Every structure is written in C-alpha cells, then in structure tokens.
Amino acid sequence: MLMWPIIGVPSNASSGRRDASSGPSAMRATNTIAMPDVQSLLKPHEVLSVVDYGDFYVDWLTTELTIDHVTDMVAETAQTGAIPMLVGGDTSMLYPGVKGVAQARGKATFGLLHLNAHPDAEQFGDHTVSDRQSIFLLLDEGIVNGSDTIQVGLRGPEVNVETLQWLRSKNVRYHTMAEIQQRGFDKVLKRVLREVENGPDAFFVSIDVSVIDPSEMVAAGRIAPNGLRLEQVTRAIRHVCAAKDIVGFEITDMAPMLDFSRLSVVNANAVLNACLVGIAVRKSGLDPDYVHPLALDHGQR
Amino acid sequence: MTFDSFDVRAALLLIATALVSVALASDEAVETPEHVTGEQRYPFDSADPREEDEEDIELPDSVAPKLELLTPEEVDFLKSGDARAFAGSDEDTVEALNERTPEEVKAWVNAMQLVVDHNNYKEGRDAPNIPLNTESPNFNAWRLQRPRAMDPAREPGPVPLGRYDGYGGPPTFGGHPMALTKEDLIAGEVDVAILGAPLNMGSGWRDSGARATADLRLLGWPMGGSDQYVQINPSEVLNIVDYGDVAVDNNSTERSMRHIRETVREIASTGAIPMIVGGDHSLEYPNVAGLADVYGKENISVIHFDSHYDAWWGGTHLIGHGYPVYRLINEGHVRAADYIQVGLRSSGPDKSGFKWMREVGMRYHNMAEVEARGWDAVIDRVVAEASEEGRKLHISFDIDVLDPAFAVATGTPVPGGLTMREAIPIVRRLCAESNVVGFDLVELHPALDPTYKTTLNSAHIIKACLTGLAMNKEGLTAKHYLSPLSSEHAIDDYYGDQQKHLDATAAEEEEEEEDASEE
C-alpha cells in the first residue's frame, strides 16, 4: 500500500525570524492534521495510509552539515515508493527535500509548484546553501527544470529586476502578487492550474508559509504583508494535489513562538491537510474540484 | 556552483575588490587564530580533560570460549573503554558475553565497532570544515564596512541622534549618543561603548539576534537616567555611547567570531569598556578574547552569571552557546582559576564537571550554595573574590541566571533563579567595587515575552552596571555603598543609626559644595 509519511525536518536557520525548528512539534501537538474535508466529505486518514515518520536529524549550527543527511533520508524514504510529506524547518530544507526525491525518481522528472513570498533564487551567496538559495540551487543543478517550476505569491524584498530576469531566463512560471492584484486571484489560479495541467505528470508541491497573509500566518519566519488568504492557498494546493501525481510535499518556515494564539499552527496544519485531501480525492477517482452534493446543498424545498 | 549572470558577477567583484582593501583594513593579526573555516585546522588540543582515561574492561577466563571467533583487534576493542559505553559496567559486559553465542559475540563486537567508527570523524568520508562558497563575489559583504572616504564629512566624536536630549530621533541604547568608529571613541573620551551583537545561533529557542538589540533600543530607556539607590546619574559621570550593532553571519557562529572579537578589541584599545548586548552566549568567547588581545592573555578574570556552566566540550562544533568558557580556558585567554561562576542550577554538569572545576581552581557559586548559605553570604563572597587585588574583570551576564518569573524570554530558561532584587545589587556592586573592563548581557529573546518584561529587566541589569561604573569613577567603592539620604529617612532612630546617616549626608553635601566651588 502506498504510504504517506509525514516527516519533521526541524532546521532553524531562517534568514528571517527564527523558531521554525519548533514547527514539526507544534503541528503534531496541535493535532488538526487529516481532518475530514467538508467539500468532498472524505476523511484523508480513511483513504490514505498516513504515518508520522518522526524527524530527520539536523545539525543545529550549520545548514551545510545538515543537507547531505536530509537528502539521503528523503531519498531512502522515496525509494520505498512512499511520498514524503515534509514539515520544516526553514526553507533551506526545500533543497534537500526536492533533491532527495529526485535521487529516487530521477532528475527533472517532475514539476515544482512553489508558493512563497520570496523567490529564494539568490545567486551569489557566500554560503553554499540557505533558504534564500534553495530555488537557485535546484534549478542550477538541474534537479528540476525551470520550465517545470511554478512560483506563486512573490512579493518579498528579494523580488527585484535581476531576480525576475533570471527566473524568466530559466523559463520559470512566476506569479507575483502584482499579477494577482492586477488580474484577480481566480484568473491567476486558473492560469497556474493550466500550467500545472500542461506540465509533467508528477509534481512536488512546496509552500513557504510566508505566502499566506500575516493576518492568518503571523508566525512566518520571513513575514511579508499583503499575501494570499489561507482559503486561496488551500484551494490551490488541494486542486494540484488532486490533479497530479504528487511525489513530495513540503511546508516550511512556520515559527510557532511568533504567534502566541497558535492560530498559525492550526493554519499550517490546514495547508498540509489540503494536500492530503487532494490526494484522497484523486485516489477516490473524483474530479479535483469535486463537491459532495450533500455538502453543496441542503436539498430542502 | 555556476553563475549565469557573468556581467553582474564581474561588476560586483570589481566593487567588492575596490572596497575590500579599505573596508576590511581594520583586521589586525592576533596571536591566536580563531577559526577554522576553509582548510585550516583548529590549532589547539581539543581533547576533553574531564573524560578520565578509562581502564580496560577486565574479562574473566570463563568468557574465553565466547571470544574464540574474535580477532586480536576485536578482543582489544571489547576490552576498551569504547565498548563500555554500550554494555555499561564490567559486570554488564561479562553478562552480555555470557548471554551470547560466539557468533553473536562477533556480530555484537562488529556492530559496536561500526557505531564507533561512524561516530568519529574519518578523513575522506567526512567534511572536516563547513564548506563556504569561496567564489562568491559577496563573500565578505556581511562584515564589509563603508570606507571612511564614503562617509559624509564630519568631525569624529559621539553624535546625539535626537532632536532633543536623548529623544526625538532613532532609538539608541538608553538614549545615549551614537558612535561608529574608533576615532569617535577617542575624540569623545568614551568610557563605555554599548555594542549590539545580534547573533542568534545558540540553541534553545532562537530569535534573539536583531530583535534583541532592536528591542533594547526601543524599550531600553532604563539604561539612561538616574539611580535612586546611590543617587548617581551614570550619564553625567561617564561618557556612554551606543556603538551600533556588529555584523554577524547568522548562518555561522564560527564565522562571526573573528569580526566580533576585532570590534571588541577596537573598543577596548581606546580604554573604553565594551558592553556587549546579545545575542547568544557564544559571544562570551570573542568578547573576552578581544579583551585579552588588549590587556594580555591570562590578565582577565571572568565572572559568568548563568544557570549553565557553558564549559561543554567535545561537540562537532568548536563554538556554540554551550562552549565559550571551555574555549577561553583551552586557548589560554583566561586561566581557569580566574573564572568565577554564579547561579548554576541546570541539569548539568555532573560530578566530573564539578570535580574538573574544583581541580583547576574555578570558583563556582551554584544555587545549591545559595540554598545552603543564603544570598547575602554568597553575594559578599562573590564580590570579595571578584575584587581581589589585580583582577581585571569581565562580567558575562546570561539572563537565564534570573528566575523565569523575571526573564521568561530566554533560550534555555531554568526555574529557581535570581530575583531582580538579588541581581541588581550584585551587578551594581561588582561594577563599583571591582575593576571591570568588560560586560556582556546575552540570551535575550524578546519574541518569547509579549509583555516586554524581560527586555525591561535586561535594560535594568545593564543600568545597574552603568551605575556601578559611575560609582567606581566617583570613588564610591566602599563595600555595598548606598546613598545615606535615599536609603534612610533618618527622621527617627528606629534602627539605632540615625546619626550615622545624618552625618554621612552632611559630609557628602559638604564634598559636593567643595567640588562646586573648585569648578
């Protein structure tokens, strides 16, 4: 049976505010993962074989020393046929997450949907890896093709002319908040979903929680105002996880201590759950945007 | 790694090269090489003296049949201390052998050897250093200082940033004027330079870093103004400046050390007292090493306020917030006998750690001593030790020495700590009665405390030292001086020493009048 292991990767080297290392623990403790879904009326736990696969070890003081081990462990997990659902940790862990899956399945054999306020395409870093370099490294090393990479929600301070030009030169499909504000979210989502549809058969879905507006995700390590609503993010992720074969999922940079209400933790779980629901919808042979008739309408005259 | 945009790279390289010769020129060669990024090896013996040489495990003849499949090397391994870590005591080892067949014994020994081999560094298999991208044209961007020629022209000296006296401008530590260069310190005859060090790689909860230094500026007004207990305003006695933040690489504690050390050295070389606010406790290492660069090795004493003893050793990393004490001793910056520890109460160290401290002459004053003797006895003993003739003292104050009721916003809080009513007097007294040449306050993590209480209490600890330093400069170094005016109304003779307070008050007034007439 296909397994869906949820794995913590508690690194803590965000270039913004820190405490992402507490992300996996806090998401476990606030146990709202795999809640029943009101749209499909599916219970992901009943449809999928989901397990908590514990944490992968990280070196507390250097991302550099962490990378190889996490890559190896993700590859080992993926080689069993299981689909790693990774919970960061900061976004530097996106690089070993995707790289490990690529080692198991082959380079450039799947697309990457990346929701993030930050492009993370820094080219000239003095370190060999960091959150700001994760997309750069994945594209530079040919682990994913630029043309198979879709970025949504860009708006952070690293979005500049040079970076966008570089992404464009790599054929990355990027969608900034400027495009979303100009054209409206629904239109942009339609465009994104068409790009996913026309892309490879399989996708790795990743989200840096900074893509969500601070009103619903104040605990983002690299917070950026004027983001997407939680509902917009979960709708997009749910659809893609239902429309494509998913080879990996990763949610990063949720730093629980920055939100004393713990709402950010609950919402991070909702994002993870959106992908689990999407996968359950696909496994049940339903249309990605399927709505159960009982949930849509009370049916009374 | 490749760079696609060669034009950008070339341009950045050109700019960087043009700046580097000037902007990093303040680097001075020091006797002790700090680190060890790149190909360099750590130049000191890193064996841990606290790990006593373990004797071989003695195996009785009765287990000989169990060992028949082992090679001589495997038998040696089985007898070694390494194997004891798996089985436990000698008796446990013998029992483990008796329970196994010779085949199982061989498999067990091989498994132990594998674990030991994999646990240790192995050339060729493991990276000896943390790899950096030496091709980066921005390699030193994080610590590159603007060359003076690019500064707006100005006279050297501290700059008050506010429109008014201490406010109406960007927040500074205590509202004190800003200084950015060594020339500013010299021209301003600066006594104390408060330096932010936003390093947040220590373990425990993170998020000290920039938020700690920023919040201490926003909420650090207690660092300015008068002190009621001794009736002194430090700002009127001392030239105090905000020396800005020192650059750190928040992806590498190792890499941050050198620049922090040279900045501390820069301050101390002018005769000013560096007062570093952090940032995690790794900072104690560059702070004290920077002082030793100026005052000489083994010439500094350190008093370490902490719930943890921070002398751990043997980790993969050479520096982290648990290692600074050991590194300073191991590298010869400070003699172990010149270390005083106050407030320890965390789960470690164990007996071997305390035995080591006792053997090397390190004075420790744990909360267990406070429980046994009472705080008043301990504070007098600590201040007397710290004030011994000839000591130049650095105070390293980890706010987790305070009880979490007063300082919850710290990376590794431990209950049962000092109250503010205990902490303020000891810091004030040390800074007044001892010869303090450096001070740091570390491990403030403001995000953990939405009430800002921890930040305010941290500012009050710094203020207590500023007050003490001002007392020292004014000659108020008598044991536990308090103002005879503010510490007693002296309207009646309730405590039997009314006249003493009235006389002392009169004497101080007379002295002030004399000073005023001299001026």
Image (tube, rainbow, N blue to C red):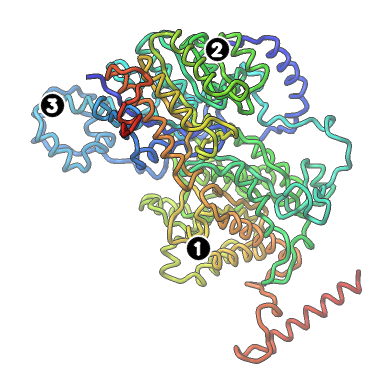
Expressed as whole percent of the image width and height from the top left, the position of residue B395 reads: 60, 55
The amino acid at mark 3 is: Glu
Q: Mark 1 points at which residue?
A: B418
Q: Quadrant of residue B150?
A: top right
Q: Nearer the viewer, residue B191 or B39?
A: B191
Left or right: residue A24 compared with residue B426? left
Please determine whether, in this image, residue B69 is positioned above or below residue B249.
Answer: above
The amino acid at mark 1 is: Leu
Q: Give the SS element for disc 2.
A: loop
Distance from the alpha carbon under mark 3 to that under mark 1:
54 Å
Please tell me which residue is depicted at 86% across the width and 43% down the height of the picture: B156
Classify the position of the C terminus of chain B by image quarter: bottom right
Q: Mark 2 points at which residue?
A: A172
How many tags in the picture? 3
Distance from the alpha carbon under mark 2 to that under mark 3:
57 Å
Near mark 3 (Cα within 10 A), the count class, few <14, some 14-19 or many ≥20, is: some
Q: Quadrant of residue B468?
A: bottom right
